[in-house]
Every structure is written in structure tokens, then in C-alpha cells.
Amino acid sequence: MHEPSGNGIPLLEIRDLSKTYFIGQGLFREPVELNAVSGVSLRLDKGQTLGIVGESGCGKSTLSRMLAGTTGATSGRILLEGQDVTNLPERQRNKALQHVQMVFQSPYSSLNPRMRIADIVREPLDVHRRDLSAKQRGERALEMLERVGIGKEMAQRMPHQLSGGQQQRVGIARALISDVRLVICDEPVSALDVSVQAQVINLLRELQTSLQVSYVFVSHDLAVVANISDLIAVMYLGKVVEYGRAQDVLQSPRHPYTQALVDSANVPDPALEKSRTPRILKGEIPKPTDPPSGCRFRTRCWMAQERCAIEQPELKQRDGSPQSVACHFV
Amino acid sequence: MTVGVTLPPPTPTLRVEDLNVSFRSRAGHVDIVRGVSFDIAKGEVFAIIGESGSGKSTAAQAIMGLLPDHARVSGGLLLGGEDIAHISARARRRLLGQRISFISQDALSALNPCTTVGYQIAEVMMVHRGTPRRQAMERAVELLALTGISAPEERVNHYPHQFSGGMRQRALIAMALALEPELLIADEPTTALDATIKAQILELLSSLRARFGMSVLLITHDMGAVARLADRLLVMYAGKAAEVGQATDVFAAPQHPYTRALLRSMPRLDRPGEALVSIPGSPPVPSNPVAGCAFHPRCEQMGEVCMRIAPEEALLRDGHRVACHFASREPTDA
Ligand SMILES: Nc1ncnc2c1ncn2[C@@H]1O[C@H](COP(=O)(O)OP(=O)(O)OP(=O)(O)O)[C@@H](O)[C@H]1O
Ligand SMILES: Nc1ncnc2c1ncn2[C@@H]1O[C@H](COP(=O)(O)OP(=O)(O)OP(=O)(O)O)[C@@H](O)[C@H]1O
Ligand SMILES: [Mg+2]
Ligand SMILES: [Mg+2]
């Protein structure tokens, strides 16, 4: 069963969340609507990781930004420990979301280039923990840096004097220093070499165990997502098409899109990989401004039938599948 | 194999000879690329992988002549046999624009935020080829479609911030392919792409090399992409080539301890939840170079000689070169 085990209030609950952008078409034409995220419902428990995968442009970053409160939602609800935090006015938002932090793909551009490492990590405490003295805040920053493997001598450096992997660890130290409960990671390891990537992932897992934080983890690398996630949501064109325990979704994918995704993942072995023909998705790629009727994947699906154009498949458990799947034919 | 006459080897599309790059800093010159040499044949995909900060992007920028003024570059660069290292900066820019395309690692900020994506792609053809605007815009739509962007005829009129990360990366790929280059230098071109789109892009590059003999220099951390596309690869560590060889040979039997450790760090889809192995110790800092072999403080088979003497690249076989004192040296096939 993929439903969170705790029967109390989940750490994060998303209900029917949507985001529509309006794209201008020039002076005298009506802007068109683009549904970047459409009717997404998910939940995540304390100390767990929800991996989000899906096609480029399917709405993962938009969803992440809504969860972090930097983009407003068009409709739906975000509940954090039972409290509604959707579209709060700025002052209330800062307070309500003080336990939510973000880690980005590009570590360098998310660190202030004119600040020292130690000050960058201390900054969230300066905002949220005015009860501590300046000295205490500085000490905590150094402790946190030590925990992510950055020693005192490096704490006085500027961001450009660190390698990509070290910068990403600084980003993580900063995200985890104030009493954080949810960290939204949008492709946090895509820019790192596999050895540094391994260090960062091990670090995230270790901090999760000791601090009981939850992660929403967006990545295109299925092996990375498989490694860190408890639950996985697969998105296609703004909707969740498959959702369940990581091993169920990745080891026995049920939705045709998930199957194609898992099948196209490259195997890191040239002898095997060069002789393999992954299934390349054919068919018309739908416009997000004018999504297909019924099932959004049907224009590229090899199983599509008439019914798919008429009836939108519901995301639910089907025929003994442990995960939820939005497909009529599972 | 015995052949009656020995043909002269064909001229490589790109030859890089003993490339060195250092940056001037307050503490003097810091060496970032230290004597890297390789050839890329026509129609070949050559990959560079290796440690973050080992100088991969710096090497690519040196080839493109894009480094800032405080960089010092030396070494030979031949494009189709023609010297491009010692010509005027202007002649070089023109030549490179016409014959080599470059996709920079910083793809997400490489687009101009104030112009539509379509116009930026078209502009490349208008400037370098004198293509009329209408035709160039039509071609931009085709190129976006080729990279798997839906509704390309609408998307050409969008601004970069209206694109997702992976869509911006594909727009840059479209731009790089607009001039049908002899050589494509792609620095991390697929980091922001999901598996299905990535498969499609790799397929596209593979067909361009098969049909038009385009050569590709692929810089990446993505071992899956290397496995799929690369014919040969170079593993960089601390500014030097640790190992060069056929992709199949290097993956099947890595000879340098760094390559072995790197390949071991890969997460595997079939072993979820397993703690990952990373290389102990920390990567070298260029301003504080390590004596002897740069990898020795982190190496599992370090010997006394490694602390004193930097190993030379030694040829094993089939062009497989390794810079390690302990690489199993086999006689080279004559
Ligand atoms: N500020 C914006 N204005 C208009 N459209 C936008 C904006 N931001 C995103 N979009 C559109 O919303 C959709 C979802 O984009 P989003 O960035 O969330 O995708 P993503 O899943 O993160 O993709 P990627 O994997 O490529 O990063 C895309 O069609 C994109 O063009
Ligand atoms: N303009 C510059 N001035 C000074 N030092 C620089 C400059 N550009 C890069 N460096 C340094 O050169 C080294 C190599 O950087 P480079 O970007 O080439 O690494 P890379 O191998 O591409 O790494 P990654 O895999 O993280 O992209 C780094 O230590 C970096 O700090
Ligand atoms: Mg994104
Ligand atoms: Mg680089």
C-alpha cells in the first residue's frame, strides 16, 4: 500500500492543485491559457521522500514553486501539517512557510556571490531565529557546515572558490539549518559528477534520518530517484498519471507513459546500450495550450482506443496494482 | 588485419595538442588544463567525462576561444588540418561560427530574455548564412520540432521564461544545429531532459553524424548518454587526461583507479535504496596542486612513486591511453 502509513495528519497534503499561465499573443489577441499543473493531489508523511518524474515541461518545477510558495496556485489547496498555506499574503506566508526550504539545480546561481559561505548559511537564522545571539547563530552555521563536510577553513571562502559539489552542499546546509520540515529539491544533483552526486545523495539521506525532514525530489535521473524516494509521482502534461511506492512504480510500471520512460532510461554500459532499441515515443506531442480530450497521453499511446478520447481516466488503484494509475487499460 | 598499402590516416575534424590553460589570480597563475591531447575523427562522437571542476568546460571554451582575458592558453588546435590557434581573434570567431557550434553548460541563462526564442534561432542563420528572415523563421520552427518541442509554430513566439528548463535546453540544441556544423561541442546538453526526450535527442545527434558526418565533442556527467552515443572517451581528473580509449573498452575494463571509482559511484535502477559509494577524500583544489599523481591521496592502489612522480600517459592498445604507474601495460599491437 502506498497510502502513508501514519493515520495522523500528513506533513504535506496537496488537493486538486492547478496552475494556469496566461500567455500573451500580441496586442490585439486574447492571451491563451496554459494549464501547467492540473488537478494534482498527493500526500507525503514526515521523514519521507516523494520523487517527481515526468516529461520536460510537464509541470514539475511549477508544482515545486507552488509548494515553496514562490508561485501562486490558480486553484486547489496546499496543506502543511494540516494548515492551509495556499496563496497566503506575503507576511503570513513567510511565517507559515518558514519550515519549507528549496534546493535548486544550479548551486552557484542560488548562492549570493558577494557573501562568504558562513554568512550564506547563517542567513536563514538571521531571519527566523532572532531569539539566538549573533554569536550563537554563527556557531550553528559552522556546525551545520561541518555536518555537510565543509570545514572551518572553507567557511570563509566566497562561492566561486568552491567546486560545484561543494556549492551544492552549502545550498543544502542553508536549507537545513533552520528548523526545517520540508525541503523541495528541484534537480539538485543534475550538475554534479556521479561521485559527488553519490556524496550529496548519501548526505541528504543521512540528514533525513537524523532530522526527520521530508523531501520532494524532482529529477530526470530515474536511478537517482529510485535511490532516494519512498513514493514516486509520474507526471504527464500537468497531471499525475501514476503514483505509488518507488519500487512498484519503477520496477513494474503500469501506465504506458511510465513504461516508456523507464524503457528509455539509458543503461550505463556501452556494449549493452548500443545494441538496445529503446521505445521512442511516437505520435503527436500535444500542445499544453490545447491538451487532448480524455486521456492526455492518448496521442502518443500505443494502446489508445476510442474510449480514451472521450473519458478522462481517473488516478486510482486498478486490478490489483499496488500503485494508483490513470489509465483505462491497466 | 593486414593491408597491402598503408593509407595515410584521414585528417581528424579536430586535433587538440598539449592544451594548457591557466588563470591569473592574486596568488599567481593557477593551472586548470594541463597538457590534454586528443583527436576527433569525422563523424565521431568523442566524450569527456570526469570530476566536477577538473577543467572540462575550460578546455571546451579554450577550443572555442571564449575564455576571459585573464586566461592563458597554449597548445595546438587544428580544425580539419587548419591551424586555428594562431589566427586573429576575429578570423577565429568567424571560422568557428561557420564550422563549429557550441552549446554551453550554462544553457539555462544562455538565452536572451528579451527576444523570442524563435527569433534567436533564426538570427543565427540570418547573421552567418544571410538567410532571409522569413525563411530563417520557418527553419526555426522545423528545428524546434526536430528537438521534440510541441506546437513549435506557437513556441517560436514565446520568450525564454515561458519555456521550462528542458525546453530551453532544447532551444539551444536547435540553435546549435541551425548551421549544420562540422563539429558540435556540447557541454552538458541533456542534464535538464527526461529519459524519453533525451533518447530522442541522442537519436537525433546520432542520425546527424551518420547522415552528414557531423563530429561531436560531448562533455557530460551522464554515463548513460556516453554509453549510448560515444565512440571514444576521455576521463579528466585535475586538469589532465587520466584515461582515453574506446567507450566500450573503458567501461568494460577501466584501467585508471579514478575511472574505476567513478564508475562504481553510479546509482543503479535495479538496486534502489542502496547506499551509494563515493570516492573518499575531497577533490583537488587547482590553486594548491598535489605533488606526484594528482589522484594519489584518494587512490586505493597508491604506491610510494605516486607521491613523487606524475605518471605519463602510456599507450596500452587500440589507442587506449592511461596515466597511472600501475596500469597493466600490455604490448601495443603493431
Ligand atoms: N512563467 C511562465 N509563463 C508561462 N508559461 C510558463 C511559465 N513557467 C512555465 N511555463 C509553462 O508551464 C509548463 C510547465 O513548465 P515547468 O517549468 O513546470 O516544467 P518542468 O516539468 O519543470 O519541465 P523541465 O523538466 O523541462 O524543467 C511548460 O509548458 C512551460 O512552458
Ligand atoms: N574564469 C575563471 N577564473 C578563474 N578560475 C576559473 C574560471 N573558470 C573556471 N575556473 C576554475 O577552473 C576549474 C575548472 O572549472 P571547469 O568549469 O572547467 O570545470 P568542469 O570540469 O567543467 O566542472 P563541472 O563538471 O562542474 O562543470 C574550477 O576550479 C574553476 O573554479
Ligand atoms: Mg523544471
Ligand atoms: Mg563544466
Image (tube, coloured by chain):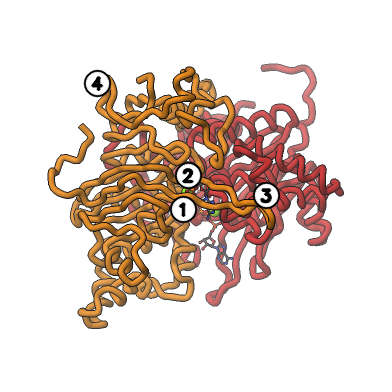
User: Does any portion of residue B7 appear in the rendered image?
Assistant: yes
- Which residue is identified by label 4? A320
Secondary structure at badge 3 equals: loop
Neighbourhood count class around disc 3 (C-alpha, 10 Å): few under 14, some 14–19, many 20 upward: some
- Quadrant of the rendering where the N terminus of chain B is positioned: top right
Q: Chain of mark 4?
A: A
Q: Answer yes or no: are tags 1 and 2 on the same subunit.
A: yes
Distance Cα–Cα, label 1 vs label 3 = 53 Å
Relative to the observer, which residue lies in front, B222 or B244? B222
| Amino acid at circle 4 | Gly
- Which residue is identified by label 3? B157
Secondary structure at badge 4 equals: loop
> Looking at the image, how many numbered discs can be counted on the residues?
4
Dots 1 and 3: beta carbons under 8 Å? no
In screen coordinates, is A141 left or right of B42? left
Relative to the observer, which residue lies in front, A117 or A149? A117
Distance Cα–Cα, label 2 vs label 3 = 53 Å
- Which residue is identified by label 2? B324
Distance Cα–Cα, label 4 vs label 1 = 57 Å
Q: Chain of mark 2?
A: B
Ligand 2 within 8 Å, label 1 CB: no
